[in-house]
Amino acid sequence: MKIFSKFGRRGLYRSRRGVLLGVCRGLAEYFDFSVTWVRVLTVVAFIFTGFWPVGVLYIVMALVMKPAPAVTPQTEDEEEFYHSYADSRKMALGRLKRTYDTLERRLRRLEDVVTSRDFDWDQRANGRS
């Protein structure tokens, strides 16, 4: 399964269907190799170089590569949000908080109108109590 965006770009992502952090499957999908061969080459590299060089590289790649989107973004806004979330969760949480704060302010204004005395009198005057 290749991750292609609507805009023709394809990215290097950690696969969500991978065995161990999804690095090998992500590399295989990006370079269009068989995942089996990528895993075999990784294991051979582990054996012949010792654990540390390849192990550290594998962990660094797992930390650097973004996880593949669960749902392929359909619009530019969705793709922008995914990349902002994957790059900086703090920035994405800030964006969600701003959206929540805006909705909360609108709801408070609505509550203020509905619970005001003027609203009560208007309702009584129009016979809708």
Image: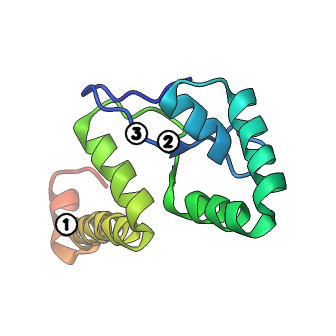
Kind of element beneath mark 3: loop
Q: Which of the two marks, 2 or 3, is nearer to us in this view?
A: 3
Left or right: 125 with respect to 79?
A: left
Q: Residue at x 73, y 45 (%)?
A: 42
Give the residue pinned by disc 2.
Answer: 69
The disc, 3 or 1, on the residue closer to the chain's N-terminal end is 3
The foreground one among 116 and 112 is: 112
Q: Residue at x 37, y 33 (%)?
A: 10
- Quadrant hosting residue 18: top right
Question: What whole-number distance in Å separates the C-alpha atoms at marks 2 and 1?
Answer: 47 Å
Question: What whole-number distance in Å separates the C-alpha atoms at marks 2 and 3?
Answer: 10 Å
Give the residue pinned by disc 3.
Answer: 11
Q: Above or below — where is 67 with respect to 88?
A: above
Give the residue pinned by disc 1.
Answer: 119
Q: Amino acid at mark 3?
A: Gly
The foreground one among 85 and 120 is: 85
x then y, percent, for residue 72: 44, 32
Residue ranking furthest to the front: 48
The disc, 2 or 1, on the residue closer to the chain's N-terminal end is 2
Q: Amino acid at mark 2?
A: Pro
Left or right: 121 with respect to 82?
A: left
Q: Above or below — where is 82 with respect to 106?
A: above
User: The C terminus lies in which quarter of the figure?
Assistant: bottom left
Question: What whole-number distance in Å separates the C-alpha atoms at marks 3 and 1?
Answer: 55 Å
User: The N terminus lies in which quarter of the figure?
Assistant: top right
The disc, 2 or 3, on the residue closer to the chain's N-terminal end is 3
The foreground one among 69 and 115 is: 69
x then y, percent, for residue 95: 31, 66
**Disc 1 crowd, CA 10 A, few/some/many (<14, 14-19, 20+):** few
x then y, percent, for residue 69: 50, 41
